[in-house]
Amino acid sequence: MKNISKKILSGILAAGMVLSLATPFCTTVAYAAQSNEYTDPADVWISANNRTNEFDINATTTYETNYCPVCEIETSFLTFRVPEYTRSGETALNHGVAYSDGTLIDGAGKGNADSGTPGVDAAYTGYHYTKTVCQKCGTINATNGRGDYSFNKNVYSLNPCDSNFFLPFDNTTYEQYNSTYHKKIEKAGEYCQYCKGTYATAKEKQEHHHLDDTVISELGNQRFHIVGDCEDCGYIENDYVAAKAVVQSYYGKVDGEAHSITLTDLSEAGVNTSIRYGTEAGRCTKTSAPSYTDEGYYPVYYEITYSYDGESMTEDGVSYVWLLSADNNNSVVTSNIHTHDFRYLETVKPTCTELGYERWQCSECGALEKRNYTPATGHDYDTVTIREASCTQGGLVLHLCKDCGDFYTETTPTIDHDYEKHIVPATCTKAGYTEYKCKDCGHSYITDITSLIPHNYIESVTEPTCTVKGFTTYTCLLCGDTYIS
């Protein structure tokens, strides 16, 4: 139990955490005040046919300073921590197992580690497995002491996670289900910054989309376009509300009554339609249409404003009041119904968002009519790169319409690191490894850690004399270490 206490203490006192290593390992610098950048190990767990290999590839790694009993100094250790997941959700220490190979606390017997696969059949226990490698002499688990079972063995030992190093998290996600509902996957709890072990409760439920509506006016289509965007799952719904009024001219004979144009509002519910009238184009200020009783041909200009949910659009036009005297025998007017003689006037080209059309005008009364609509052209975007993507930051691209100036920006994903491989061979004083370092940002990680190689000693014999004993000096050609025998 003395060695176990020592391991627990060394696991808590992570005094020398500096540079994080480690793809393919998950890495962090485990200070208590670090930011909450969290990934549940159960979501990214990689299985292997060897338990130590599986722990190595899923471990969080840090550099820490501890006392090495082999080197007999405070020195740097590469520390591997991986959360303990068991089928029962209780630590294996509860039934005596203290090491990843199933060895018991006494270092002799074997027990059941109750291991399982995170996210499949196992839950986090609040403990983690730890392995250390001295960066000076290469001894594995030297921090646990020479008398510990794990000393210089490639195994992990169990330690409790410190309660001071837990942070809350909320990894709630959403998935589209249909046009009415989405699926909400609630996953929240807390996690250990040391080993990334996760206390989480997860549940699923269906809920209605939370639609955030954007209203777009489409005068050419005589409607409002409502785009509903669910702020949670990204579902998009399109709806349309008609915004249309029909203005009719008046054609007839003087009969002593006042006559004017008429308006029929065909807009759908929710659309507010208001109209202003005038006798000159661009000066429509009257709330009621002017009326006429005398013979004559009177243009009546109008501006119709349609409003819906804070968005508005205005349609302008002109209609006519044409009154003939009672004794006028003009063959054009044979009754109160005037037959237009429309002639082509002009073509209005479509824009990015509005329909094109032909404008026709009656040769007799001047009434205008739109015909032969053509589709809107849609935006013609030029793409401008504002910021190139790198391995640490996504790119930024501007899409700018060449015709109308409409624009939007798009973020592009980060690119892969461009790693250079550097092999550091093991020596008799330092472990070997392969380092991969990004040429662009400097991010690095190591793999393939190899143990120390033996010293390469040469002998130097000092012959005895009549007053001094002889001896042999052994000197390592690689590091200069010496001893005498």
Image (cartoon, rainbow, N blue to C red):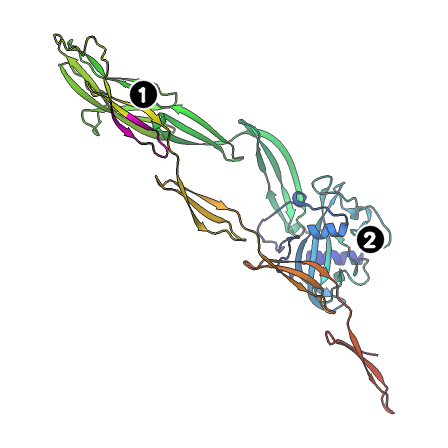
* Rendered position, 266 above or below 167: above
The magenta segment is: 344-358
Residue 351 in magenta? yes
Residue 304 seen: no
Question: Where residue 25 sits in the image (x, y, percent)?
Answer: 66, 53
The answer to which of 196 and 297 lies nearer the viewer is 297
Q: Quadrant of residue 432?
A: bottom right
Q: Quadrant of residue 275?
A: top left
**Residue assigned mark 2:** 105
Question: Where residue 348 sits in the image (x, y, percent)?
Answer: 29, 30
Q: Secondary structure at mark 1?
A: strand
| Residue 141: mark | none
**Residue assigned mark 1:** 245
The answer to which of 115 and 259 lies nearer the viewer is 259
Q: Secondary structure at mark 2?
A: loop
Question: Where residue 287 sits in the image (x, y, percent)?
Answer: 24, 23
Point 64% across, 34% down: residue? 203
